Image (tube, helix red, strand yellow):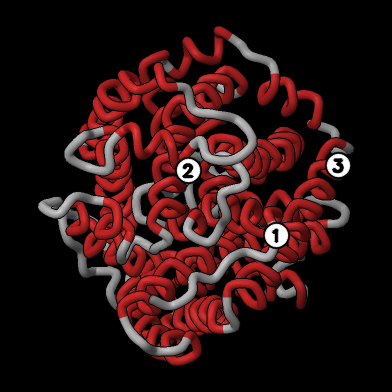
Amino acid sequence: MKQREQFASRLGFILISAGCAIGLGNVYRFPIITGAYGGAIFVLIYLGFLFLLGLPVMCCELAVGRGSRCSIGGSFDALEGPRGKWHLWKYAGIGGNYLLMMCYTVITGWMILYFWKYLTGSVSSVTDPVQMKAIFGAMAGSPWQCVIGSSIAVILGLAVCSLGLQKGVERITKGMMLVLFALMIGLAVYAFTLDGAGAGLKFYLIPSVKNIEHAGLGKVINAAMGQAFFTLSLGMGNIAVFGSYIGRDRSLPGEAVTIIGLDTFVALMSGLIIFPAYYTYNDAMIEGEGGPLFLFNTLTCIFNNMPAGRLVGTLFFLFMTFAAMSTVIAVFENIMSFWLEKTDLPRPAVALINVGAMLVLALPAAFSSNIMSGFTVFGMTVDSLEDYAVSNLILPIGSLIYVLFCTNRYGWGWNKFLAEVNTGDGLKLPRWLRPYMAYVLPAVIVAVLVLSLV
């Protein structure tokens, strides 16, 4: 067997694992649903679900990775019994990684293109929301712009992975994540100086029963549970592969808490940037917009109404590019590790093969907002269908499989899982938690799956 690579430092493991979880959803989806579902009181409920749901699932995935010393391609095979069928999930799991990158690299390309637009000043003078919407429409409606953007994301991501775990993935992602945190703090400090900062922070940080009554308690709980579950991107082996690269000197619950803490930090900081800006320049808001439209139309107009709009916009989309690329690199590393375990090819060759494959596989999503915009499946465009399949099917099913595998005697088994997860110094997972993880948590995951489908 090939010698398993390892991280050079614990900081590298923490930042890269956090980078896998940190993505675009932390930055624009979290503030949007926070605003729609009650502000501060939604945040409190979300944090509770994050640790009730996300923490135990992450412990399972990290333990499977470290216990097997394999990616999703071989982790279940190494730990299951002789008649086990858990390893069949590796095909859906690795397929989910490719499916995610097919649409995610296109959106990452949009971030890169808007960073360039702000850097060159081509959009920084536009303050009319309708005109800004037309600019975004022209970009998304241009096949060649979408292909160029996604190609840059694919080539950069796989080029980093081709350099190796320590020299490429760890060194570059670690620096990128540290710059990302610095950018967020700087933008948040600037947002605090805006006229509407007080009102925005009050809505965001001070719980109000009135706000939750307006949104509806049931909807708030469902939205918080869904956001907490999906924000960590668990279930496809992306966290497990980084668990396979670390030693046994530290227990895994403490590492999981740190990773989730950094992921939550980015989400909360995004709110500290966006809510003061929104309450100051809400005349730039186009009502009813969410997702990419909120990011590329509303926030850009808010930035352009600021005195230092071009600088803020440039830094914001640089931060967005780093947030997106951290996920791209992490997922590509999982794909690379799968190939390295299943073939005798060196990293550069695997990277080159996957560059060619991903450039082709990303084309349907790149074309879904332009020349293929009229093509739909179940009423969804290609990129929406790809995102829906990953978020609503593969992630929850995969998380359910990891939890059952670690707690069920027909899988790895609770005792072996507990021994692995608690090996090393640090926070321990208590034995009495088994009934919750073996029965309650799977039921909650199934409920999340059903609700997301309905």
In depth, the one of 122 and 225 nearer the eye is: 225
Q: Earlier in the sequence, mark 1 or mark 3?
A: 1
- Under mark 1, the amino acid is Ser
For label 3, the residue is 189
- Under mark 3, the amino acid is Val
- Neighbours of disc 1 within 10 Å: few (<14), some (14-19), many (20+): few
Which corner quadrant holds the C terminus?
A: top left
Q: Earlier in the sequence, mark 2 or mark 1?
A: 1
Residue 308 location, quadrant: bottom right
Residue 379 sits above or below residue 37 on the image: below
Asked if the residue at tag 3 contacts the one at tag 2, i.e. Cβ–Cβ closer than 8 Å, the answer is: no
Q: Which mark is residue 75?
A: none
Which corner quadrant holds the N terminus?
A: bottom left
> Mark 1 or 3, which is nearer the eye?
1
Residue at (32%, 48%) from the top-left corner?
Answer: 395
In depth, the one of 326 and 421 nearer the eye is: 421
Q: Earlier in the sequence, mark 2 or mark 3?
A: 3
For label 1, the residue is 9
For label 2, the residue is 231
Q: Position of residue 452 (x, y in %)?
A: 27, 37
- Under mark 2, the amino acid is Thr
> Mark 2 or 1, which is nearer the eye?
1
